[in-house]
Amino acid sequence: MSRPRFLADENIPRTAIIALRGKVYDVVSVWEIRPGMSDEEVVELAVKELRIIITFDKDFGRIALLRPCAPGIIY
């Protein structure tokens, strides 16, 4: 079984991303690839790359209801 792939929103601390990577998780961070992405752009990237979004942003709850094709959101 493969490990899940994650997309960390900009509000996720770098220390958390580094810790996940240290456990051999595949984590891409918005602050590394394109800071300032809109929430919709984050969802589009997650769908395109089949990544689960990790965020502290409550707006993603609304987006999850409107965009059920998102691979998943961890709040």
Image (cartoon, rainbow, N blue to C red):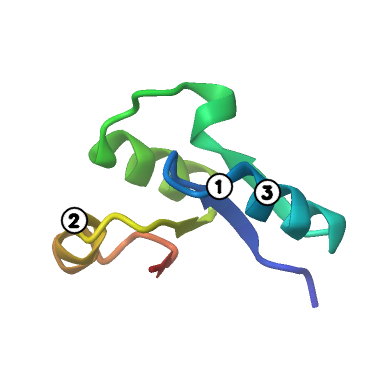
Q: CA distance from mark 1 to mark 2?
A: 18 Å
Q: Which kind of residue does numbered mark 1 sit on?
A: Pro
Q: CA distance from mark 3 to mark 1?
A: 5 Å
Q: Which element is circle 3 on?
A: helix
Judge the density around disc 3: few (<14), some (14-19), many (≥20) Cα neighbours within 10 Å: few
Tag 2 residue: 59
Marks 2 and 3: which is nearer the front? 3
For the C terminus, the quadrant is: bottom left
Front position in the image: 54 or 40: 54
Q: Which kind of residue does numbered mark 3 sit on?
A: Thr
Marks 1 and 2: which is nearer the front? 1
Marks 1 and 3: in contact by CB < 8 Å? yes
Q: Which kind of residue does numbered mark 2 sit on?
A: Asp
Q: CA distance from mark 2 to mark 3?
A: 23 Å
Residue 59 image offset from top left, x and y in percent: 18, 56
Tag 3 residue: 15
Judge the density around disc 2: few (<14), some (14-19), many (≥20) Cα neighbours within 10 Å: few
The residue sitting at 22% across, 61% down in the picture is: 58
Q: Which element is circle 1 on?
A: loop
Judge the density around disc 1: few (<14), some (14-19), many (≥20) Cα neighbours within 10 Å: few
Q: Which mark is residue 24?
A: none
Tag 1 residue: 13
Marks 2 and 1: in contact by CB < 8 Å? no
